[in-house]
Image: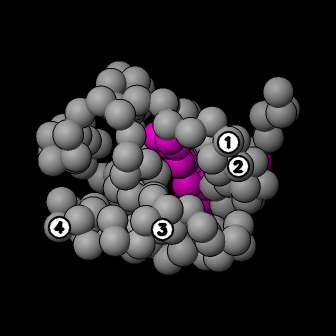
C-alpha cells in the first residue's frame, strides 16, 4: 500500500480531491497510481459499484467524481440525479473505453467525458481541462 502524501498547509486548498468509481480492478489501480502521482490531485476514495459510491461521497463530497460509465448498480439517470443532490459542487466525469458513450454521458448531464484509452499524460490533461 502506498504511503499517503503529506500536504503542505499552504497547498492543501489547491489540491483537488478525486473519487474513483470504477468496476474494473486493473483500471482502478491504474487511475489510482496516475492520479496519486499528481501534486495537484489526491484520490479521496474508491468504489466498485453505484451503491458503494453513493454511501461514500454523500458523507464527504469530493471535487471530482470519475464515474465508470458501465458501473454496476443504479441506472445512469438516477445515479447522476442522486449525485447532483448529495454533491452539488462536484464535477461528474464519465470514463469509458467506448467513444460512443460520450454523447450519452453528456445527455445525462455529466460535466465531462474522458476515454480510458488515453495515455496517462493525456488523461490527466483532460481531467485538468474540466472546468
Instruction: Name the one closer to the observer, 27 or 3.
Output: 27
Q: Nearer the viewer, mark 3 or mark 1?
A: 1
Q: Earlier in the sequence, mark 3 or mark 4?
A: 4
Which residue lies at the image location 70% right of the left edge and 49% below the top edge? 30
Q: Residues within 10 Å of mark 1 (few under 14, many from 20)?
A: few
Separation (CA) of disc 4 from disc 2: 27 Å
In this figure, which residue is indicated by the disc labeled 1? 26
N-terminal of the pair, mark 4 or mark 2, is: 2
- Give percent across and percent down for residue 22: 50, 41
Q: Residue at x 50, y 37 (%)?
A: 23
Q: Residues within 10 Å of mark 4 (few under 14, many from 20)?
A: few
Residue sitting at x 82%, y 27%? 1
Q: Secondary structure at mark 4?
A: helix
Q: Is residue 86 above or below residue 84?
A: above
Decide whether residue 130 is among the magenta residues. Answer: no
Q: Say the numbered circle drawn on residue 131.
A: none
In the image, the segment drawn in magenta is 8-22
Residue where numbered disc 3 is placed: 114
Residue 37 at x, y = what percent? 78, 54
Residue 107, disc? 4
Q: Picture coordinates of residue 129 (x, y %)? A: 50, 77
Instruction: Give the x, y percent position of residue 57.
Output: 38, 32
Amino acid at each position: 500500500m502506498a504511503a499517503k502524501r503529506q500536504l503542505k498547509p499552504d497547498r492543501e486548498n489547491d489540491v483537488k480531491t478525486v473519487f474513483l468509481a470504477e468496476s474494473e480492478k486493473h483500471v482502478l489501480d491504474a487511475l489510482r497510481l496516475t492520479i496519486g502521482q499528481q501534486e495537484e490531485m489526491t484520490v479521496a476514495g474508491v468504489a466498485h459499484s453505484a451503491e458503494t459510491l453513493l454511501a461514500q461521497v454523500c458523507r464527504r463530497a469530493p471535487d471530482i467524481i470519475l464515474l465508470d460509465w458501465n458501473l454496476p448498480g443504479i441506472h445512469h439517470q438516477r445515479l447522476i440525479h442522486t449525485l447532483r443532490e448529495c454533491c452539488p459542487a462536484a464535477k461528474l466525469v464519465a470514463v469509458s473505453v467506448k467513444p460512443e458513450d460520450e454523447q450519452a454521458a453528456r445527455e445525462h448531464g455529466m460535466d465531462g467525458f474522458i476515454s480510458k484509452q488515453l495515455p496517462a499524460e493525456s488523461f490527466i490533461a483532460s481531467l485538468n481541462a474540466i472546468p
